[in-house]
Image (tube, rainbow, N blue to C red):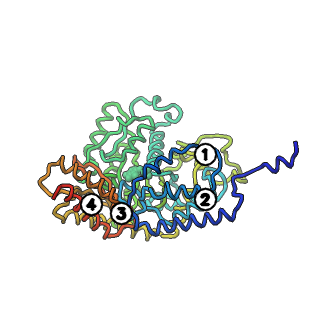
Amino acid sequence: MDTTDVLVSEESLDPVDWSALRSLGHRMLDDMLTYLETVRERPVWKKPTPYAVRRMQDALPLYPQEAESVYEDFLSQVLPYNVNNIHPRFWAWVQGSGTAEGMLADMLASGMNANVSIGDHMPMYVEQQVLNWSKEIFGFSVSAGGILTSGASIANITALVVARNYFSKLIKQGGLRSLPGQMTIYGSSETHSCLLKAVEIIGIGSDHFRKVPVDSQFRIRLDILQKMVSEDRQAGNLPFCVVGNAGTVNTGAIDDLEGIFRVAQKENLWFHVDGAFGAIPRILPEFEDQLKWIERADSLAFDFHKWFYMNYEVGAVLIRDSKIQRDTFAYPATYLSVHEKGLSGGPDPFSNYGMELSRGFKALKVWMLLKEHGLQKYASLIRQNISQARYLGSLAEEHEELELLTPVSLNIVCYRYNPGGLSEADLNGLNKEILMQLQLEGIAAPSYTLLKGKYALRVAITNHRSRRQDFDLLAEATCRIGRSLAGK
Ligand SMILES: *Cc1c(COP(=O)(O)O)cnc(C)c1O
């Protein structure tokens, strides 16, 4: 074989022409910065055209296409039809709004292509630092455990796996059939669906998630919680965990966390808090009374990509006792053992603390953004969102044709158009139509929920770009569309 031939035919995925890629890269960066700078000028939502959707059925590419032309495809087919949670009037579900700095940090992390699983390299220490800062924010001790996740769903599952395995040493190897009874878990009826999924995934089954009824403010009824636990014990079931909600997804209700902690302590249950977005106001002194009990939790799930406004995806779980976390996930594999020196030295691998081995460098944006903005900045933005929610709540209360459906406790406002004289069924239909019109016209993107059978326009404000006038505009548009649909 001719060796020069072999050398000539070797290739890589690096650009042949770095300077061409450099100018394309600069163009992309400029385009995206402009895109973010001008977001307010565009409609909040735009339906993907049938053509753009059809293009997503193009054949599998076998041969190269110029990078620039691929970028043109992105510009014409993808970018215009963003979910657009970056828009100042995006308030659907609970979605964070991201930042330009976060975009840049993600670029840096992606350029490094760090796999934050094992080894003696700085990305491992950056994630440890971010976890340590998180512990400080929520009052966990520095020796506590934790791990960054793609979001609160995975954070909640991670916590429940730890809680489950802690309940009995037999489960890790023997599975649930090594137990003498049925494990049961408790949380309010307002608990997020990801926890019910978690209970299904970890083999306990959602039938064994006891949905405790809520009071008029959508908070867990402690008396019924206590009763359910006692009844389960009498029936020979095995209560192992109770979930407290710091900010329910429907209304932002914060459970009586102290009360849940007391029940957990008395009944020897794992106390888990789902604080996806609602744990974050812990950084405000005015929420200290309600949220300081998070520090007594055995585990906490929360998101950086919601109310810390960080770019998708990044969430976290904290576990009070890192040894219990490690006992749950550590698995001795020779190829993953830590050496005394060299690249294979360094911190305990993250794979010993969670479900994944290969993991991206999500920690970098959190580290950079916390440094760039400082916790005080986040505190004032969160306070701003809460005051905007109260403002919209007062608009809905004061306006004759609007009705506030639940008191505003955090950053979520549930209201409807109600001009009077319509049946509940008609109001439900009318408000659903109003919601769709608000989105179709590109004015605003709230979402919806059902509260005691009433269809509510639901505005969840985890958006640093929203301004007061955006809520004036929403209230006006709701009434305008409502009137025209109701034929008034
Ligand atoms: C969003 C949310 C979750 C799920 O978090 P993801 O980051 O979307 O996976 C869980 N609980 C509550 C209360 C939420 O708002």
Q: Which residue is mark 3?
A: 89
Q: Nearer the viewer, mark 2 or mark 4?
A: 2
Amino acid carrying mark 3 in the image: Arg
Tags 2 and 4 touching, CB below 8 Å: no
The residue sitting at the left extreme is: 421
Give the left or right position of residue 271, taking residue 336 as reference: left
Q: Residues within 10 Å of mark 1 (few under 14, many from 20)?
A: few
Amino acid carrying mark 4 in the image: Val
Q: Disc 3 versus disc 1: distance between alpha carbons?
A: 38 Å
Q: Disc 2 versus disc 1: distance between alpha carbons?
A: 16 Å
At 29% from the left edge and 43% from the top edge, which residue is drawn?
212
Q: Secondary structure at mark 1?
A: loop
Residue 329 appears anywhere in the view: yes
Q: Nearer the viewer, mark 3 or mark 4?
A: 3
Q: Residues within 10 Å of mark 3 (few under 14, many from 20)?
A: many
Give the left or right position of residue 270, taking residue 435 as reference: right
Q: Which mark is residue 408?
A: 4
- Quadrant of the rendered image containing residue 475: bottom left
Quarter of the picture holding the C terminus: bottom left
At 43% from the left edge and 59% from the top edge, which residue is drawn?
138
Q: Which mark is residue 61?
A: 1
Of 171 and 31, the residue lying toward us: 31
